[in-house]
Amino acid sequence: MDGGLSPALLAELRRACGADWVFTQEHQLRTYESDGLLQYHALPAAAVLPGSAEQVQAVVRACAREGVPWVARGSGSGLSGGALPITEGVLIVVSRLNRVLEVDRENARICVEPGVTNASVSAAVAPDFFYPPDPSSQIVCSIGGNVAENSGGAHCFKYGFTTNYVCGLEVVLPDGEMVMLGGKELDTPGYDLLGAFVGSEGTLGVATKAWLRVVPVPETVKTLVAFFDSTHAAGEAVGEIVTSGVVPGAIEMMDKLAIEASEQMAHAGYPVGRGAALLVELDGAEDECEARFEEVVRICEQCGSDDVRVARDEAERQLFWKTRKAAFPAMGRISPNYFVQDGVIPRTKLPEVLDRIDELAAEYDMKVANVFHAGDGNLHPLVCYDGAVEGEAERAEELSGKILEACLDAGGSITGEHGVGVDKRRYMPKMFGEPDLAAFQKLRCAFDPAGLANPGKVMPTPRLCGEVPGPYRRHPLEVAGLAERF
Amino acid sequence: MAAAPVATEHPESPEEAAELLRTLGEGGQAIRVRGGGTKSTWPAAGEPVAVEVVTDGLGRVVEHNEGDFTAVLEAGMPLVRAQELFTSTGQMFALDPPLGEGDAATLGGVLATADSGPLRHRYGGVRDLVVGISVALSDGSLAKAGGRVIKNVAGYDLGKLFAGSFGTLGLAVTVSLRLHPRPDETATAWGSSADPAALAGAAATLAALPLEADCLDVAWREDAGQVLVRFGGAAAERQAAAVVDRLRAAGLDDVRASADDDARWSAQRDGQRSAAGAVLKVSGRPADLPAVLAAARDAGGSVVGRAALGLHWITLEGEDLARRVEAVRAALAPRQCTLQDAPDAVRSAAPPWGEPDPGALVVMRRVKERFDPARIFSPGSFVGGI
């Protein structure tokens, strides 16, 4: 199984990474056939595990020379198929690049390789500092993947996203050149290529080092869970909290079905049958937190909560979070299969969009559980289905797509943190018009005129870059009749 | 200075702007975009332009979604007017750059220059607060990126690409902003010292604490400097009072706290501009502060800056500016110093831009070629002659 890679290219990959780190056998490649979104799978022609930035560069350079496409992969925990391999291409797995290169507390910076996990960044700067972006997969997900996806997490309403914390990247461009975008300093001269690169889903190049900003650990954290009869009432509380000027570290909502499923797994004593649970966490200066926390309790009660539980200690706080983070895997307890959706709406549209989701669920006769990052309007509806029933997966997918349309109709987005990948590229034309997509393509072509970095992701249809200075070469996709030049 | 343009255009809508740019693009006529004109001398002189496209006809509020803390505004709107609108609903766009003569700075101009003020400490820069953008390009297209929700990863983040691009890629016609609650109360604690090491030490101590301050600035003028910390919100006065002891413990003199603090922060903002002198913006690291203060003192300059971000503005006034600008640059190398305000004589002697990574500059040129193939947007005025 070498998928048609030339012997010369394979030899070069082995020379670059060492023969032990170049996989071409089917049983070796199976490990990498999917990322976290298992309904998509493909075997790459070869998977390589470089051990240094220079080895990554050698691999990319070899691919560029032969016009072979490639995909970079971190821990493979992404949820949009962004790291789905290309059958005729090379998969560059950065897991071995897992060193923390520099901890600079004086400047609140840390430099890491892309295979370092998100959680180990905070661990490396503890106890005085932490790295705020905290996707649910933080124990396994890699900084390289976080950079590609501009990962968020539960705390990004207050603290921001990956893009707000990356100040510099060493990047191997698809032509094999190694460049520095941004730096250890802010506001380096020229276009903000760093800002364009973060969140580009591996289509502009592969990061080999990241300089990240870390921030002081807040003095105190206070967490509560409030239960409501309906998501409407909980949504009203979210609105009141945010407009009152409180900026919670996190504000998370679960609906009835999500509470039921999570409780079966986490056993936190949540009242099964209540309409909504709202987890609110405040962090910051001690007295400011105390004062604000009383305000939050009052708002929850005013909005109809008769059951507000304040975490008495760290163990109880962890239990609250465990219940929230169990929501996705817990779906397995109430449904054989489920799709995780990732839509965004303006927060004030929450009631009408939830009503619409209820209508759609009824129309399709399917269960949809809802988990949200409520502060920033990021919804994760979980569409439950039984894959053993013929046609049900397809209907669930259709329903999932209709939910995204409802988000767009409300003025939102098709993805808040999971990315477009392969999974959502078909929805891109619903959110962006042709001139918008053409502008995206201009950026893509500036970084990757040959279209070799993660082709087939993000953009709804394959596009080529048109005339570039230098001799004209037919693109592999063009030769194969898969795309036309326009 | 660039030669005076021969004509000005004032498009009245995004569509009209796009159509105008198509015509200019087809004719290959070089243009420059002008908002409030408060920072138009900052870029390099570049090549002569035939047309100046002024955004004063693009000043509408497209939407202000109060409950969602977002707004979409046309880019020609003066920032001061946008803030009036938001203030009336208890909100703010958390960006406070100096507004220039007549408070004329526009949203588009602030985006194009990526200018910022003391609030950047807590809220980030323009790149961090713009959640969507629409732009008119030289092929006549109107393209948008991002959206009007605060969390969104669909498509490329062109808002960041255009932030700080100095109008060399296209014309931003609308911007979507994330807004924040405007604090009812503010209060500031500050302390002084004639010893740069004491100032730098105090700033470093405060930067490492979880204060959740809105602003953390330093200032140096003549023979003494200050560290200033501002808090916003109901507990602001209490928080400022609590920092007083820390500033004293750090060895600063005349430590005080006050809720009557607006003038102090206006002065910090004003310190980023100079009518007759030369201003260098230093892209440094927090721990560079002693070196920045030393370079400024040696060159007879003053400093304002964001202590925890490593961004500082050094102002030189008086004689022999070009030489002193180069002396500061040499002292701080390899940190990049961008020349912002400066008299013509200085500008012709000292290039405004620092030097990006050579590999990144290659990509920047390719970005310019792709977005503005007709090369009509302020040719030659940006980094590396872009």
Image (cartoon, coloured by chain):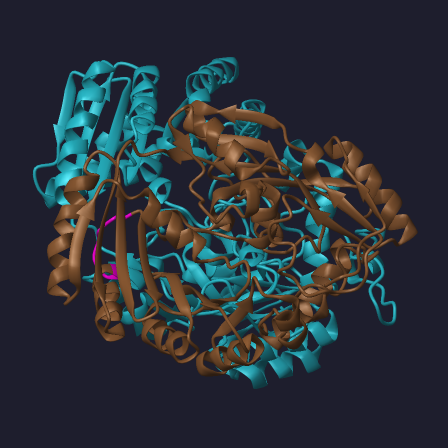
Query: Of A8 and A248, which appears nearest the observer?
Result: A248
Q: Position of residue A133 (x, y in %)?
A: 36, 51
Q: Quadrant of the image for the N terminus of chain A?
A: bottom right
At x 16%, y 16%, the residue is: A306
Query: Of A478 and A41, which appears nearest the observer?
Result: A478
Q: Position of residue B291 (x, y in %)?
A: 36, 77
Magenta segment main secondary structure: loop
Query: Of B373 and A360, which appears nearest the observer?
Result: B373
Q: Does residue B148 show up magenta in the picture?
A: no
What color does chain B have in the rendering? Answer: brown
> In the figure, is residue A119 to the left or right of A283?
right
> In the figure, is residue A373 to the left or right of A461?
left
- The cyan-coloured chain is labelled A
Where is residue B132, by image quadrant? top right
> In the figure, is residue B297 to the left or right of B3?
left
> Relative to B243, is A182 above or below?
below
Q: Position of residue A30 (x, y in %)?
A: 51, 60
Where is residue A25, by image quadrant? bottom right
> Relative to A135, is B13 above or below?
above
Q: Is residue B59 visible?
A: yes
> Relative to B261, is A228 above or below?
above
Residues drawn in magenta = B207-213
At x 64%, y 78%, the residue is: A10
Most distant residue in the left direction: A312
At x 43%, y 22%, the residue is: A348
Most distant residue in the bottom direction: A15
